[in-house]
Structure formats: structure tokens, C-alpha cells
Amino acid sequence: MTIVEMLERNAGIFPEKTAIICGNSRISYWEFHERSKTLANFLISMGLRKGDRVGLVLQKTPEVLISFLGVACAGGIVFPVDYNQTHENIEYLLKQTNPTVMIVDGQFQNLISQLEEHCSEEKIIVVGQKETGRHLYWDDAFARPSLDPPDVQIRDEDIVYLNFTSGTTGFPKGAVTTHANIYWNTLSATESLGLTGEDMHVCMFPVFSHPHELFARSLYLGGTAVLIEGIYPKTVAAAISEHRVTCMMAVASIYDTLARLPLSAPFDLSSLRIPESGGMYTHPTLEEKFKERFGVSMIPVWGSTETSGIALVAPVSGGHRPGSMGRPSPYYEVKVVGDDGEELPPDEVGEMLIKGPGVCGGYYNQPEETGMYMKDGWYCTGDMVKRDRDDYYYFASRKTGMMKVAGVKVFPLEIEGVLLSHPLIEEAAVIKIQDRLRGEVPKAIIVIKDGFEISKEEIQKYCEEKM
């Protein structure tokens, strides 16, 4: 099923149901469908053909979802632009994609002169206030609403967007994502997490990180997406409280800030039932603190750009093992391999490889990067993990973060775990530094809890006893 078919189905079954909430704005599935189709026809009238690329330089507003679906309806390929990137990186991205159309928030008109080097002035659509020039205005696209289906055949295997992530060369690489990739990842997530059409979803990730994460699950199920731009704890808590949000995805540090809110804070988070924690390691002490405060368990997950979203998830209904990333989600295969590429037995640390219909086929116009990370249908994640005998996976380090101390493999996360288990240590981070004798050695940066003191020697002794 394509995301275009999902939108058409929802508009037909429950046209008046709210699809998107953003501030005081509410957009129904019928309006979402109508505006997406109208934009698709407008883009085609501008000369967009199937397979052409359309860049989005937008904030987290309804316009970004309408743009994504509008481009998809027209058979185009979306790519989001991180407006925080350097001029050099944006230049590289535009050269890679050669966009036919750009849709740009008026706030980022300082970038337009740079964009015009790769996309003609009359092919740039400005959302919001626009300056003088031949750029088109967002409202121009909707001057004459059109629900006529575009004369374009959309198939499951068609590329729908390029999700750019960091590359080994220092420049971004675009994961080629199809409608089928999004469908299978969404199906996997909804089955793993027990999501329904009644869920209210809020996602903390920015538009240029995982744009489909903003709408894919709610679109597939007929739920509602709540868009918020800020990640301040009071902003997040207020959105959950006001809209009775049931599902959210965020990094562990955001859950930590929520758990630190004063008990007197006027927010009711009792509606929250699926708090996914991904993007960074979730420490067991944070899991305990969050559950104690809000009465609901955080759900550690693992996902990536290349897997189109989460591919491992902790059990929702109990059985989670603290410190683990969970087990493989439906429709994903996971294995751990050694330096020789052979699969390792349980409890041995190696690189995690993932396979399945949600895994992208490669990187756009980057055969060298594709060959490096995609091997025989398996995505080489670069994450060093171990698997227990019950198929739970535990993160050890990034492949590039692992250190060899006098030839022995050492993982920073294991040392951090020991340090954080000390009752007087608030935070700890371990990095590797060069050493003439042993090649590399770990160095810890530690924050002591307020009002306490502890010596370097005491910490070293504690670590020696625990490791």
C-alpha cells in the first residue's frame, strides 16, 4: 500500500476526522486529501514529472505534510533540507538531487539565492511571507482546488523520498526510500506497539531527520498527528496534556527532562501509553525514574534512516529487560557478525546487520557508500551489540567508538554503566584518547551529585571492583 492510497482511503472512510493538529489549527482527512491532490496537480502544471526531486525547506507545520503527500501524489521524490547545515553541505545535497521544484518557508529566504543556483526562480514555492521576485506563493497552488487524480501511476516500489544522513566522507548520503519501505516499517511498528486508529501521535524528531515519522503511523491507522516545533519539557508536556496524546517518540534526554518537571507542574500526562525512546541509549535508571513519575514504562527502540524507522522494540506488555534495545520487530531479520562476517553466538559483541522489506535499497547516486553498507540485502549498521539467548539485543558502542586497549576490545557504554551505578555520580561520559603504550585508553568525564564529594582514587577503586 502506498501513502497516497492511505490518504485516499482515510478521506473516503472518515473525511471529517482530524488528521493534523498544529497550534490552533485542525485539518481533517478530507482537507488533507484535497490540499495534497491540489498541490500535486499544481506541481505537474509546473513541469514536475514522475521521479523528479522536490526539496522541502520547511518547519514542522501542516505545510510540510501536505507538501510530502502532494509530491507523492504527483509521483515526485521528496527530500528534506536541513537548514542548519553548512553552505557546503547544502550545496552538495542540491548537486546530488538536482531538484525540479523547491518548497521553502519564508523564514529561510536567506537560502533562496543559494537554491536558485540549482532550481530556477520560478520553480521555488514560498510558504508565508515572500519577497519580490518571480517565486511562486504557496497560496497560488490552492487558488483553484482540484481533486482530479493526477495522471500518474504510483506503485509500491516507487521511490517516494530521499532521507539524508551523515556519510563516511563527511557529506550527507540519501537513503532511497520507497512507498513499500514506509508501509512495511509502519506495519511492523503498529503490530509491535499495539497502535490503533484512536491514538494521538506526537513526534519530537525534526522535519529534516525522519519526516515520514511525523505522519506514517497516524496515516496508516487513521489516527491524528500532533505537530509541535519546540522540544522544551513544558512545551512537550503541555501538548500531551492538552491533546491527550497517547504515543510519542523521543530521545532519552527528553524523557529525562519530563521526569525532572516539578511535581506542582500543571500537566496531566496520564493519557500517555506508548513512550518510545530511540536515537540514543536508554539507561535503566532513567526507565525506573520515568515509570515512578508517570506510571508508564518507557519503551526502548532501535531504528535508523536505512531501516525506515524502528527495527527493534522492547515488549509493550511486560518482559522488557533493562538496558536492552528489545527484540526484532515483525518483518525484520537481525544478526550479529564478527570481523570475518560470520554470525556470532549469543553474548558475543559484534556488528548488528538488519534485513527486511523496510530496509532501503541503497544511497542515491552513491554506489561506493551503498556497497559499503548494503551487502547481500543486509544493512550493516555500524552498531556493536550483543544478543542474549532469548533474542534481546544490547547496545555496546558504535563501531567507530569501540576502542582497543592493548589489543583488548573496550566499549565506553559498559564503563559508563558502572560509573552511573555509583550512588554519588549524577552523569558520566567515556571517550577514547590516544596512549603511547596501549594505543587507546578510556577517559571518563564525571558529574558528581550536588552536595557530595568523591576522590578520583575512590572512583577508580569502585570501577576495579565492578569490572
Image: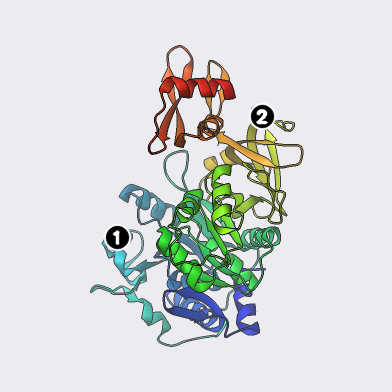
Percent coordinates x, y for residue 73 in the rendering? 55, 73
Whether residue 360 is visible, yes or no, is no
Q: Residue shown at 68%/29% (left/top)?
A: 348
Mark 1 surroundings within 10 Å by alpha-carbon count, few (fewer than 14), some (14 through 19), many (20 or more): some
- In the image, farthest residue toward the bottom: 144
**Residue bearing the label numbered 1:** 111
Percent coordinates x, y for residue 58 in the rendering? 39, 65
- Residue nearest the viewer, comparing 291 with 210: 291
Q: Residue shown at 61%/54% (left/top)?
A: 297
Q: State whether residue 137 is above or below residue 206.
A: below
Assign a secondary structure to mark 1. helix
Q: Report, in whole angstroms, how far the alpha carbon at label 1 lies from the one at label 2.
A: 45 Å
Tag of residue 338 = 2
Say how many tags the image has: 2
Whether residue 275 is visible, yes or no, is yes
Tag of residue 274 = none
Mark sitting earlier along the chain (1/2) = 1
- Residue nearest the viewer, comparing 46 with 332: 332
Identify which amino acid the numbered label 2 is placed on: Gly
